[in-house]
Image (cartoon, rainbow, N blue to C red):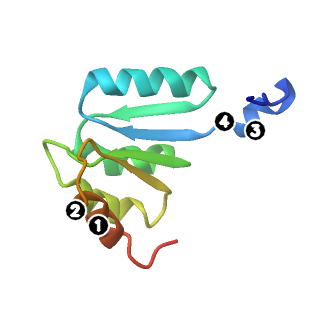
């Protein structure tokens, strides 16, 4: 069972989410679902745009694709995790990708 928040506190629970995903089909589904739940979402498909976007919106959460065509997602992870909670998303079913993500965030909570 899903408990819904009372209408008078829904605005307080809304999060600012920065979605970094280069695949429009995947991004559109994530954006739709998050906005439907009342979250503010900014979608960036380019690694180059992420630092400025993160600075502009100060996200409560970053959803970061592990495979970006124009930049190193793990370098972005290292930079972003200093100021923002980050969830790295991956399509790979290997052990290397999660290990690289953990290494990039070593020493962080």
| Residue at (35, 68) in percent of width and height | 102
Report the residue marked by disc 4. Answer: 14
Q: Residues within 10 Å of mark 1 (few under 14, many from 20)?
A: few
Disc 2, disc 3: CB below 8 Å? no
Expressed as whole percent of the image width and height from the top left, the position of residue 8 reads 86, 28
The residue identified by callout 2 is 96
Q: CA distance from mark 2 to mark 4?
A: 34 Å
Measure how far apart labels 2 and 3 are at the Cα level: 38 Å
Q: Which residue is mark 1?
A: 99
- Distance, label 1 to label 2, CA atoms, is 5 Å
Kindly identify the residue that appears in the image at 25 percent across and 60 percent down.
95
Numbered tag placed on residue 55 in the rendering: none
**Mark nearer the viewer, 1 or 3:** 1
Circles 3, 4 touching at the beta carbon (< 8 Å)? yes
Who is closer to the viewer here, 101 or 36? 101
Q: CA distance from mark 1 to mark 4?
A: 31 Å
Of labels 1 and 4, the one closer to you: 1
Q: Which one is in front, 60 or 23?
A: 23
Name the residue located 83 percent from the left edge and 24 percent from the top edge. Answer: 7
Contact flag, marks 1 and 3 (Cβ < 8 Å): no
CA gap between label 3 and label 4 equals 6 Å
Is there a contact, CB below 8 Å, between mark 2 and mark 4?
no
User: Would you identify the image quadrant in which residue 29 lies?
Assistant: top left
């Amino acid at each position: 069972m899903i408990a819904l928040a009372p209408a008078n506190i829904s605005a307080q629970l809304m999060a600012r989410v920065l979605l970094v995903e280069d695949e429009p089909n995947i991004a559109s589904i994530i954006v739709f679902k998050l906005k439907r739940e009342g979250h503010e979402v900014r979608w960036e498909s380019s690694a180059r745009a992420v630092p400025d976007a993160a600075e502009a919106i100060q996200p409560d959460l970053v959803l970061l694709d592990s495979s970006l065509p124009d930049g190193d997602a793990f370098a972005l992870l290292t930079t972003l995790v200093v100021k923002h909670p980050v969830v790295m998303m991956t399509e790979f079913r290997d052990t290397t990708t999660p290990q690289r993500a953990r290494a990039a965030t070593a020493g962080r909570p």
